[in-house]
Image: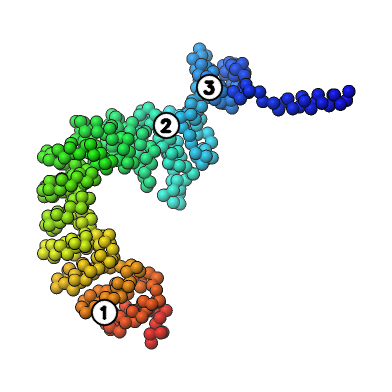
């Protein structure tokens, strides 16, 4: 008898832990229906408890909550929406564990906020670290930011100010671009304010959003010149080959400088070599933006045939034009063009002016290719040419180039030996130098004059002064 009683007790205990198939769907429908009814109870605490219980039930209550939003009782409708909106949002948006750890109620907060409130939450989540402005304060991902931007722009930015929309675009392009946000930024292409439309075009270009190309193309028919110019620039950045015929036509536009400049830039980005003759003609354009855009495009296209015209215009150009032409020259420096560039610079009396551009170009060549071309320039009869070549040599030198430099310490030309010695000594002062170079520095010390004082200073830094005595 006792034995049967104990077996019965054990069986009952086991049954308590059995989960029947219908439990997988959550509480019974009657339970959910009863809780929804309690959302309209006269007692506040009862309403609160019912709302909390339904929030805990979650998705299984979604259908009943959706129906409850049509209730004649405003309290029931309101609370049903408060519970339902986060549920719907969780299906639409997935935030990372890092973000949820810092903002555990973010779904509820977003669901309860209007557009302006969501924007403030976006600003809070993307706040920067106080001690390091390059890092976010919270452990968030790019996808988290994109998801938040999507919630803020769910209705196309209604309820936001122009500055708010600008701030959103800055958030997704600051430091590291967030391409995941592109589908949401695309909604701003139809904004009422042309300023925002133009900024959206530019932002999509920065994000590399090729999916936006069809929508940006539509803006080429805009009546706003700035919008057309921005669209052309973005299409160039995004590599839209299908727009090439249209852009080539715009390059000949004689009425609107901003469009002409944008077309030139796009031509360079799209690699349209056949546009080079037209671009060379436009280098002399009265508008500085057109000239600058042309110069950069010629650099992008590696149009070495444009070097003579670039050097000709450089001399009389203002600082802005000179800077853009300099950028082009830096891209056009090759083993073959370096002598030509220096010859033209010498003839135009601008050898020193192009030093920075030349140095950048030579750095791209590397010491093995550039050094043979620089050596003749180091002993040129023109002082400015020698000075520029020396500066270019200095920018090129690194520890890896020491073997090539050491060979030149015995060059037949004293000017070459002197330039190389100075650069080698200066390199020793700023980098860790192999011990075998010490003997070469001792050789320079014996030359006397300023070489002796410089070399002795370096030997002292290297701890080799006593050995030399």
Residue at the spot of label 3 = 62
Which residue does the image show at 14% across and 73% down from the upper left? 381
Residue 447 visible in the displayed image: yes
For marks 2 and 1, give the CA distance: 70 Å
Please tell me how crowded label 2 is: few (under 14), some (14-19), or many (20+) other residues with Cα within 10 Å.
Answer: many
- Name the spot of residue 305 as percent of width and height, x first: 14, 54
Judging from the image, what secondary structure is the residue with disc 2 in?
helix
Mark 2–mark 1 CB contact (< 8 Å): no
Please tell me how crowded label 1 is: few (under 14), some (14-19), or many (20+) other residues with Cα within 10 Å.
Answer: few
State whether residue 398 is above or below residue 130: below
* Image quadrant in which you'd find residue 55: top right
Judging from the image, what secondary structure is the residue with disc 1 in?
loop
N-term mark: 1 or 3: 3
Q: Label for residue 448?
A: none
For the residue pair 128 and 212, the one nearer the viewer reads as: 212
For marks 1 and 3, give the CA distance: 86 Å
Q: Quadrant of the C terminus?
A: bottom left
Between circles 1 and 3, the one closer to the viewer is 1
Kindly give the residue lying farthest to the bottom in the view shown: 469
Between circles 2 and 1, the one closer to the viewer is 1
Residue at the spot of label 2 = 151
Judging from the image, what secondary structure is the residue with disc 3 in?
helix
N-term mark: 2 or 3: 3
State whether residue 412 is above or below residue 44: below
N-term mark: 2 or 1: 2
Mark 2–mark 3 CB contact (< 8 Å): no
Residue at the spot of label 1 = 410
Which residue does the image show at 32% across and 41% down from the upper left? 208
């Amino acid at each position: 008898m006792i034995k049967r009683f104990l077996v019965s007790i054990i069986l009952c205990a086991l049954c308590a832990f059995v989960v029947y198939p219908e439990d997988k769907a959550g509480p019974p429908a009657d339970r959910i229906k009863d809780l929804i009814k309690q959302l309209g109870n006269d007692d506040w605490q009862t309403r609160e408890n019912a709302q909390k219980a339904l929030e805990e039930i979650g998705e299984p209550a979604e259908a009943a909550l959706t129906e409850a939003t049509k209730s004649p009782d405003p309290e029931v409708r309101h609370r049903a929406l408060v519970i339902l909106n986060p549920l719907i949002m969780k299906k639409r948006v997935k935030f990372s564990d890092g973000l949820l750890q810092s903002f555990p109620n973010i779904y509820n907060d977003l669901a309860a906020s209007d557009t302006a409130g969501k924007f403030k939450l976006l600003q809070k989540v993307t706040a920067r670290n106080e001690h390091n402005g390059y890092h976010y304060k919270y452990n968030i991902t790019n996808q988290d930011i994109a998801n938040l931007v999507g919630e803020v722009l769910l209705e196309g930015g209604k309820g936001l100010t122009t500055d708010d929309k600008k701030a959103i675009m800055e958030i997704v392009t600051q430091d590291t671009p967030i391409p995941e946000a592109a589908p949401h930024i695309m909604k701003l292409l139809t904004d009422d304010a042309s300023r925002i439309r133009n900024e959206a075009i530019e932002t999509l270009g920065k994000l590399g959003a090729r999916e936006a190309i069809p929508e940006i193309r539509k803006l080429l028919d805009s009546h706003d010149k700035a919008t057309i110019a921005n669209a052309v620039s973005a299409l160039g950045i995004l590599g839209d080959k299908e727009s090439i015929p249209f852009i080539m036509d715009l390059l000949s536009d004689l009425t609107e400088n901003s469009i002409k400049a944008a077309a030139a830039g796009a031509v360079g980005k799209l690699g349209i070599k056949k546009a080079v003759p037209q671009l060379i003609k436009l280098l002399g354009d009265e508008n500085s933006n057109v000239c600058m855009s042309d110069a950069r495009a010629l650099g992008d296209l590696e149009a070495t045939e444009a070097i003579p015209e670039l050097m000709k215009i450089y001399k009389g150009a203002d600082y802005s034009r000179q800077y853009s032409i300099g950028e082009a020259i830096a891209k056009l420096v090759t083993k073959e063009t370096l002598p030509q560039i220096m010859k033209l610079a010498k003839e135009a009396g601008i050898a020193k002016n192009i030093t920075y551009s030349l140095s950048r170009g030579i750095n791209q060549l590397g010491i093995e290719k550039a050094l043979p071309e620089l050596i003749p320039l180091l002993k040129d009869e023109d002082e400015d040419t020698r000075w520029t070549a020396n500066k270019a040599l200095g920018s090129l030198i690194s520890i890896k180039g020491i073997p090539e430099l050491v060979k030149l310490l015995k060059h037949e030309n004293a000017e070459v030996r002197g330039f190389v010695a100075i650069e080698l000594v200066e390199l020793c002062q700023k980098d860790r130098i192999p011990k075998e170079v010490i003997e070469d520095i001792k050789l320079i010390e014996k030359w006397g004059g300023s070489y002796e004082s410089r070399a002795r200073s370096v030997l002292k830094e290297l701890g080799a002064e006593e050995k030399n005595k």
